[in-house]
Image (cartoon, grey):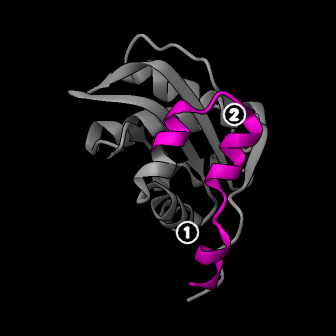
């Protein structure tokens, strides 16, 4: 298995005290954080919403991972991750989401990003710490694979 690389997470794409009216607003905020760091062009956000209409991006542990469709590949400038924390939670089709992790990747890079995020989020303690994080550096640390993950 290839070595696990650090996630492409720009500290400017981490927002820890957001509020969203609903799931669509939350997805737009995750996408806007990707636009703000130059990872995607704004049409990518519409494909994130399109993906959500076809299948929920809720993954459990209070986390959703909205991302665009393959049709959006031309809107992606470089692989990136955004983290938007909603301390009051957002109704995500009956589930309560407190962390939205937006992803964008060129080609099939989203598969790698989803796999790496899954490794992190399979640890309930790490997922809890992510939901409770109030410091950007802590979020970045939590989302990086640890030494054991890198040896896998």
Q: Residues within 10 Å of mark 2 (few under 14, many from 20)?
A: many
**Segment colored magenta:** 128-152
**Residue 12 percent location from the top left of the image:** 79, 33
Tell me, yes or no, whether the highlighted magenta stretch contains residue 129.
yes
Image quadrant holding the C terminus, namely bottom right
**Residue 120 percent location from the top left of the image:** 51, 59
Residue at position x 66%, y 82% in the image: 3
- Viewer-side label of 1, 2: 2
Residue at position x 71%, y 47% in the image: 140
Q: Which residue lies furthest to the bottom in this view?
A: 1
Residue at numbered disc 1: 112
Judged from the image, the secondary structure of the residue bearing numbered disc 1 is helix
Vertical order, 28 against 88 (above or below): below
Q: How far is mark 1 from mark 2, CA to CA?
A: 20 Å
Could you tell whether 9 is left or right of 46 in the image? right
**Residue 61 percent location from the top left of the image:** 36, 43
Tell me, yes or no, whether the highlighted magenta stretch contains residue 122.
no
Residue at position x 67%, y 59% in the image: 144
Judged from the image, the secondary structure of the residue bearing numbered disc 2 is strand
Residue at numbered disc 2: 14
Foreground residue among 63 and 111: 63
Residue at position x 63%, y 84% in the image: 151
Image quadrant holding the N terminus, namely bottom right
Vertical order, 148 against 119 (above or below): below
Q: Residues within 10 Å of mark 1 (few under 14, many from 20)?
A: some
**Residue 18 percent location from the top left of the image:** 57, 17
Vertical order, 137 against 69 (above or below): above
Vertical order, 14 against 147 (above or below): above
Q: In which quarter of the image is residue 65?
A: top left
Q: Residue 2 carries which label?
A: none
Q: Provide the major secondary structure of the magenta segment.
A: helix
Foreground residue among 117 and 38: 117
């Amino acid at each position: 298995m290839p070595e696990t690389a650090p996630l492409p997470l720009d500290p400017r794409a981490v927002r820890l005290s957001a509020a969203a009216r609903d799931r669509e607003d939350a997805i737009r905020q995750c996408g806007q954080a990707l636009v703000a760091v130059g990872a995607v062009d704004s049409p990518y956000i519409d494909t994130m919403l399109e993906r959500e209409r076809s299948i929920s991006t809720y993954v459990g542990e209070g986390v959703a991972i909205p991302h665009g469709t393959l049709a959006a590949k031309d809107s992606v400038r470089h692989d990136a991750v955004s983290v938007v924390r909603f301390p009051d939670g957002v109704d995500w089709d009956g589930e309560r989401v407190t962390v939205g992790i937006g992803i964008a990747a060129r080609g099939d890079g989203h598969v790698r990003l989803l796999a790496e995020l899954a490794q992190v989020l399979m640890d309930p303690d790490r997922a809890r710490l992510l939901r409770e994080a109030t410091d950007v550096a802590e979020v970045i640390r939590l989302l990086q694979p640890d030494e054991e993950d890198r040896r896998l």
